[in-house]
Structures are given as structure tokens and as C-alpha cells.
Amino acid sequence: MRVAIFSDLSQRFNFLLPWRTNSAAQAYTAVDTDDGDAPKSALDTLSSSRKRVWPRLTSVNVYFSVSLLFFAISLTIYLVQSSHVGSDRECTRLMHAYTPLEVAIEYEWAHAETQAMPEKYTGKPTASIEDAWDVLWNYGAFGVPIKGLTALNKSSLDGEFRAVDNFPGGGVAALLETFHQVHCVNLVRQFIYRDDWNYTGVASFTGGKKTVRHHVDHCIDTIRMNIQCLSDVTPYLIERNPHDPGSVRANHNVLRKCRKYDRLVDWVKDNTVFMMAGE
């Protein structure tokens, strides 16, 4: 059987050259076959090959285009998320356990003025000093929603928590940990000055010397754990001592981003369900 050489090559390699024009195919003539069948032109052969190749190329193009689209979308989402600066509230949720006081949390930049001893909270006890400490922490209990227990790694089945009456959706009573820690600092202060002031009417000084000392030890360890947990990484600088040329001293007047304490106090006062001294 006589077959045109180019026709045979076209059938084999036409998928590599789908863009060849019809005029190129028309330059070649058909040859007769021995079996008497109607001759096929090179153009017919090329057209048949194109019909098989173009669907494959179209599928590849669609797949590539869709993949490129998804890559572009993913890259856009990544860039948006990586450039997003979280709000203070978002950071609080990320870095701290659940609290119903979230709505009251506000921040401010402040310098810790520790160079001069503030007489309002330090020194030998006076009525005004005792009152100043008392208003820092001595507040009642508030309600925590039942649904918030899971976020605190607690369960309603873990213990017999005190229920809060008339709390929407059900709730249990709680005290604020910040107030507990301030109470502990205050108790250590009072224990230091126990011979300079009459603390017999203070609940923390009842139960005998052993009980009081145990309470103080508990408070010391509470303060230690909290300091280590928060681990303030703010550097405090070493400066030349203007009062002693040639020597240096530490400057503890550091910049911190602090929660507004008064806002927390106001929230607890507004949401107190019953009075209970911190422990």
C-alpha cells in the first residue's frame, strides 16, 4: 500500500503542532491506496488529529487556570492575615483565660514610678493607708455563665460551685484573681507591720499564729507564681548615679502597657451578686 510519507508523520506528530495552518496541509496531495478505498487528504488527517488534541489542551488550560486562581486567592488571604494587627481585645482572648470582665478591659501606657516611695500605700500603718489598700481589692463576688466554665477548664460536674440566683442562662459565683493577688500583697504588708497596728479585727489574722503564717506563706507563693507566669520582659536601664559620681544605679521607671484598674473595679461593683472577702 502506498502512503504519503508526510501524512504518516503528521498523524504521529501533529499533536505537537496544533497551530499549523490549513495552507500547510494543502501543500500535500493524497495518494492512492491498493485496496481501492477513497483517498484521504493530508488536510483530513490533520483535522482529525486536531479534534483529538484540542480537547486535551483545553482540559489542561482549564486545570492550570483554576489552580492559578486558587493559588492567587490563598496568597491574598495569607497576606491579609499576616498584615492584620489584632486589637487589644483579640490579644486578650488569645493570651488569657475566659473572663466575663472582657467588656471592661481597657489598656493604657504608663510609667512605673518606683524611684520615690508612694506614701499612700507604704510605711507604718495608718488609718488612711489601711483604707487605701482596702479599696484596691475588697469587693464582692460576681456571676460567671455556665457556658464559660469549659473555657476555664472546668465543668459543672467538677464540684459544687455556688450557683447565682436569677442569672441569665445560669451561672456560678466567682471572685476576681487580681483582687486576690492584691489582697495577698496587702496581707504580707500587714504581717510585716503586725506589731505596729491592731489587726485582730481582720479576718486574715484569725485562727491562731500557725494559721496566719500559713495564710501568709500561701500569699507569698501566689505572688511568686503570678510574677513568674506573667514574666515581665520589659528591660530596666542602668544609669549613672547623679548623687554619687562614678557609680551607677538601676532605673526602675519602666514603660508598661497596663489594664485600667479602675475600669475593672467599676465592673465588679456594678455586677456584685453578694459580698465575700477574698482569700
Image (cartoon, grey):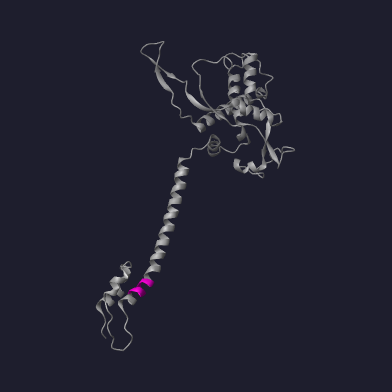
Q: Nearer the viewer, residue 64 or 162?
A: 64
Q: Nearer the viewer, residue 64 or 176?
A: 64
Question: In what quadrant of the picture does the C terminus appear?
Answer: top right
Residue 125 in magenta? no
Position of 271 with respect to 7 (left or right) is right
Q: Nearer the viewer, residue 123 or 192?
A: 123
User: Residue at left 42%, top 58%?
Assistant: 65
Residue 129 vertical placement versus 32 (above, below): above
Tell how many labels: 0
Point out residue 52 in the picture as x, y percentages from the top left corner.
38, 72
Q: Nearer the viewer, residue 223 or 191?
A: 223
User: Residue at left 45%, top 40%?
Assistant: 83
Residue 80 vertical placement versus 262 (above, below): below
User: Residue at left 47%, top 47%?
Assistant: 77
Question: In what quadrant of the picture does the N terminus appear?
Answer: bottom left
Point out residue 152 in the picture as x, y percentages from the top left corner.
60, 40
User: Residue at left 63%, top 13%?
Assistant: 126
Residue 49 in magenta? yes
- Over which residues does the magenta segment extend? 46-51
- Res. 82 image quadrant: top left
Position of 56 with respect to 146 (left or right) is left
Point out residue 97 in the picture as x, y percentages from the top left corner.
57, 38
- Res. 187 image quadrant: top right
User: Which SS type dominates the magenta stretch?
Assistant: helix
Point out residue 183 in the picture as x, y percentages from the top left corner.
61, 25
